[in-house]
Image (spheres, rainbow, N blue to C red):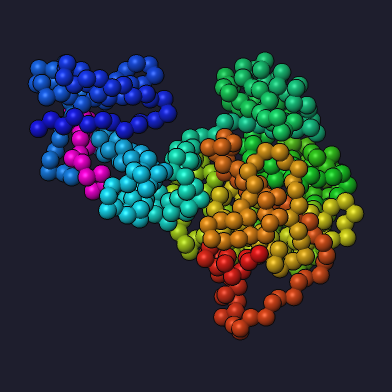
Amino acid sequence: MILKRKNRRDGPNVRKIRRRADNGQVEGEESVDGSVRSASSSADEAADDQLQQKVVVDESRQSDNDGLATTRPVGLNEREVAPLMIKERIQEAVHVLANFKVRAEPGRKRSEYLKSLLEDLCSFYGYNEFLMEKFMQLFPNGAELLEFLDSNDQPRPVTIRSNPLKTRRGELAKSLISRGMNVDPAAKWTKVGLVVYDSQVPVGATPEYLAGHYSIQGLSSFLPVMALAPQPDERILDMCAAPGGKTTHIASLMRNTGVLFANDANAARLKAVIGNLHRMGVNNSVVSNLDGQEFAKIQPQSYDRVLLDAPCSGTGVIWKDESVKTSKDHVDIKRRFTMQRRLLLSAIDAVDARSKSGAYVVYSTCSVLVEENEAVVQHALGKRNVKIVPMGLEVGLEGFTKFREYRFHPSMNNTRRYYPHVHNIDGFFVAKLKKLSNEVKKPKPTKNKGKEAAEEGEQSDIDSLKRTSPL
């Protein structure tokens, strides 16, 4: 039996064409170049021979998601057909959920569509259910969710940061263009960034690179340093410095004055930091190998500014490491959440509230999860005398003051979120805190005591926000 069926939308560059079946023509989709992507045959067997593809119905297989018989283009093997069928079901589910009351099948619950969509998204994009559920919560709009997931599989543009200690962006651009590199200013909000469209020479092996005239950095890594706004003659700590791109950026804004402490807990990664400091001409730095949590004890109230680019899940840079799709779970996020909170409190304690020029802490991650971002900052607001202040960055989306049924401090709108599908940079979060006093807030009384209280304090699940982060 031959079934005539309208194909679902296959992407943004595809337009649908509809033709009459009674004159031997077909109904299908056509791409912008005019080629037919797929088509359904008519009942006339003679016309079937003229089609580029035939759709054969396997009546033994029934779709659990749309109630229709499964269609398979002849000439494609099962491995090629399966993703197309899954993508079609995803598009259908997103379409229905966008206007559920009108488009849903009678008697079918919303939860059924969501469960089916979750399974298909995991299968099509290669995620585990834990992380996909997080993204579905973060992007309740199905169309935006698909844009985000698609962007995670696409590399970001290659960008470089010119080094003001040795050159100017305009001069650097001229030199690189003469070597066969196609570059342009990266964005309106940065005066040192260049985007590399293509290059006849390796970007990381030019004489200019080896001489320290630029570093290869994603645009998102510019943002925390811009928010920190280092000043000459200050004492500044980069708590998690490796591989050193942000450190050298800070040094350039300090004009090689003051003292810049570049720290990282991983001794092996400090080799890259030291190499970059030498190459970029930084001579105001001190390199250390300490656990960031120790600074509150060994150097309390010692710095004008601290940058904490915290270790995180990497959910904003999945294109760099696809293992993130399946390696993250509740235990991993809890471990990171706990570490991030401790590091941020240590960073705050290391800053001197009496600083005449600073007393600022910038917290950033390359994660898009609320647990690692707004929830961590909210915890610090409750534990230390700090406030969230504007970062002076025009680019970016406001951080959440409301997330699902949870509430954060109203000033959380001063934090900034960055998404690959919106800004075409890595997923990122940045918050800037101003320390108001060196006194530590007294903990609120708790019914739990001893170990139970400590465990309660380290609870990292998003469900804990309701009791730890009320307005």
Q: Residue furthest front?
A: 102
Residue pictured at 67% horizontal, 38% vertical: 395
Q: Residue furthest right?
A: 356
Residue 27 position, x and y percent, is: 25, 23
Residue pictured at 33% horizontal, 40% vertical: 92
Q: Main secondary structure of the magenta part?
A: loop
Vertical comparison of 121 with 341: above or below: above
Residue 115 falls within the magenta-colored stretch: no
* Marker count (numbered): 0
Vertical comparison of 336 with 139: above or below: below
Residue 142 position, x and y percent, is: 44, 43
Range shown magenta: 64-78
Residue pictured at 78% horizontal, 26% vertical: 168
Residue pictured at 71% horizontal, 68% vertical: 383
Vertical comparison of 64 with 13: above or below: below
Quarter of the rendering occupied by the N terminus: top left
- Can residue 52 be seen by looking at this rendering? no
Between residue 68 and residue 22, name the one nearer to us: 22
